[in-house]
Image (cartoon, rainbow, N blue to C red):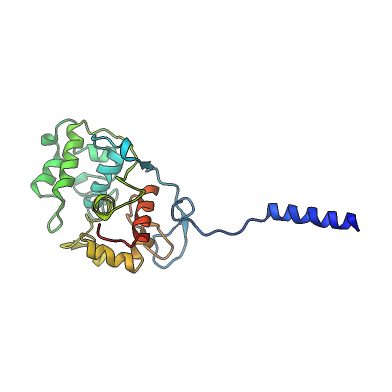
Amino acid sequence: MKTLIYTIACLSIILSCTYHKASLVSPSNPAETPLNTDPTGSAPETLPPSQLSCATTASISSTICFDSQVLPIIYSNCAESGCHDSKTRAEGYDLSTYNGIMKGVSAGSSSKSKIYTEMSSGKMPESPRKMASSQIAIIKQWIDEGAKNTTCGARIIDAATPTFAKSIKPIIDTYCVGCHQTKAAKGGVILDSYALIKNYVENQKLWHVINYHVGYIGMPQNQKLGVCQIEAIKKWIDAGAVNN
């Protein structure tokens, strides 16, 4: 009898160690998040982890970073279908890569760089779309600093306790507003004000698209947000998505 009880006890311990409870996909781990840009929800793929790591306040310098500041601005304002993406290559320019962007850049001199002069004159992007002066200033500074292909990670001022003004709006402005502004709303989506952004928070579309959830077209389409950027948005939404 004692042998039987001992055997049952051992089997129970073994089973408890080998059993793993199923877990939900964590929004903070994009390696687990299903990627599907097909709104029908078919043929899901797996998106590799973002290369944009989380940069702390202390690690952020005044030098402009290509991967997290320049490239997203050019993606959302220039390198889209019908303009300067890898397929259309309008006027021979593919602005979806560093090498392609450098065709219109004279490193160290923004005044001699076609990309900057076209932006600062208002010629590009074409009307009615308009770039923010702060974004044009970033492009100028990056070129004047040597237009280096730097990788610095996602820039978050405060990912622990994000505010709309300091953390969330800069993300939306950099990655989204180029395509989703009042006078040029791609897909009818406008994200250039708190009230409009809040609408997409309340109907949960913002959360689904930035995580590339099945059944939604993942945004930004060219470059998924970094882990800490998504986490900052999650914390802001969980705190009530207030205009702070």
Residue 151 locus on image (x, y percent): 33, 37
Looking at the rendered image, the quarter that the N terminus falls into is bottom right
Quadrant in which residue 56 is drawn:
top left
Could you tell me which residue is drawn at 55 percent across and 58 percent down? 23
Left or right of 222, for residue 185: left
Q: Nearer the viewer, residue 244 or 99?
A: 244
Q: Nearer the viewer, residue 81 or 240?
A: 240
Left or right of 154, for residue 108: left
Could you tell me which residue is drawn at 28 percent across and 53 percent down? 163
Left or right of 241, for residue 93: left
Residue 18 locus on image (x, y percent): 69, 53
Could you tell me which residue is drawn at 24 percent across and 65 percent down? 196
Left or right of 178, for residue 225: right
Looking at the rendered image, the quarter that the C terminus falls into is bottom left
Viewer can see residue 226:
no
Could you tell me which residue is drawn at 25 percent across and 60 percent down? 243
Residue 17 locus on image (x, y percent): 69, 52
Residue 21 locus on image (x, y percent): 61, 58
Q: Nearer the viewer, residue 128 or 50?
A: 50
